[in-house]
Image (tube, rainbow, N blue to C red):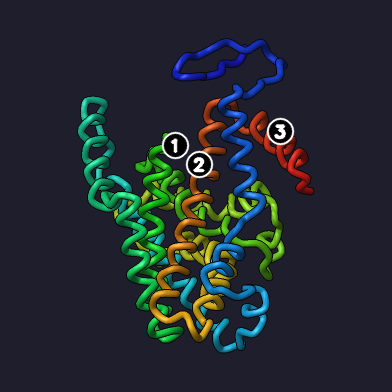
Amino acid sequence: MSDLTVAGEVLPVPAGAPISLSDEDLAALRRAVGVLEKPTLATRLSNAAGAPLDMIGRSLPAPVTDVVARSAEGAMRAALRVALATLPDKDVAPAASDLETVAERTGNRLSRLFQSADSRHKAMAVLSGAVGGAFGLATLAVELPVSTTLMLRSIAEIAREEGEDLSDPENALACVQVFALGGRGGTDTALSESGYFAVRAALAKTMAEAAKYAAHRSVLDSSAPALIRFASQIAARFGIVVSQKVAAQAVPVLGAFGGAAVNTAFMNHFQAMARAHFTVRRLERVYGAEPVREAYTLEKEALGIA
């Protein structure tokens, strides 16, 4: 017999019996599949720019793509530092009587880092986008880490709402992982796979190594090889959507106002991806990974996605 937890109640499940998601959870999974397998960023950015994004994106010269790649790498390292800052101090292992104090301390740390409401995150993203729109590519290396950190704070809020314990290194890094889920294509063979679970599988090894490092170090060094590999792998995919963002902001008539609209679309996209990603992870904690993946596959087929 195995156990199934539904609404906080542990229910016995006969060995070998198929596990079916509740109607509510199946509806949540269906929404998540639609978001994760049919990203809408290109459409959002095209609307903000008032021009077809594919046509603009193909015109980006090689020097610009090099700047985008470097900026994406820097942004992911900055995001990783913020994510690691949410972890509790690991100087000594807490005694059982101290667990409540540690939990409270972690909560306070998260409150300081992620205290902004969703609307405030978006307002600050609008401001950083306005700067990028007004001054163009020259500000990308500064503006992108700022907007990425704002998005990460919003992603972390969503993760907590879906039941993630961000004092766990693996869960904290799952927030950074969201930035690899927002695009399609790429030169990395593994990461060019379009499916959500294919991307998660491609990132699994480096994410596990990074989480293991973070869990066993009292002082976290963001330049550690395990963390650099993880940040670089995320950046390789994040750079795809950053290129789309830069292409949208490159429209001559946009300026600061258009740059703000592009950043709003950018943040909305990753918030939607985060909600979908952490919905899947929540369902996996309830039903187990395999039943959720089977249900996910069925929903993909129902949507006509190969």
Dot 3: few (<14), some (14–19), or many (≥20) neighbours within 10 Å?
few
**Residue 140: horizontal and vertical position, in percent?**
43, 79
| Residue type at the position of mark 1 | Glu
In the rendered structure, the answer to whether residue 54 lies left or right of residue 284 reads right
Q: Name the residue under label 1.
A: 162
Marker count (numbered): 3
Looking at the image, tell me whether mark 1 or mark 2 is earlier in sequence order. Answer: 1
- Marks 3 and 2, the one that precedes in the sequence: 2
Which secondary structure, mark 1? loop
144 in relation to 94, above or below: below
- Residue 132 in view (yes/no): yes
Q: What residue did someone put label 3 on?
A: 294
Residue at the (35%, 51%) spot, across then down: 118
Q: Is residue 23 above or below residue 150?
A: above
Q: How crowded is mark 2: few (under 14 residues within 10 Å), some or many (20 or more)?
A: many
Q: Earlier in the sequence, mark 3 or mark 1?
A: 1
For this view, does 277 lie left or right of residue 107?
A: right
Pick whichever, 130 or 157, lies toward us.
130
Measured in 3D between alpha carbons, the distance from the residue under mark 1 to the one under mark 2, in whole angstroms, is 6 Å
Q: Horizontally, is 141 left or right of 40 in the view?
A: left
Q: In this view, does 28 lie to the left or right of 151?
A: right
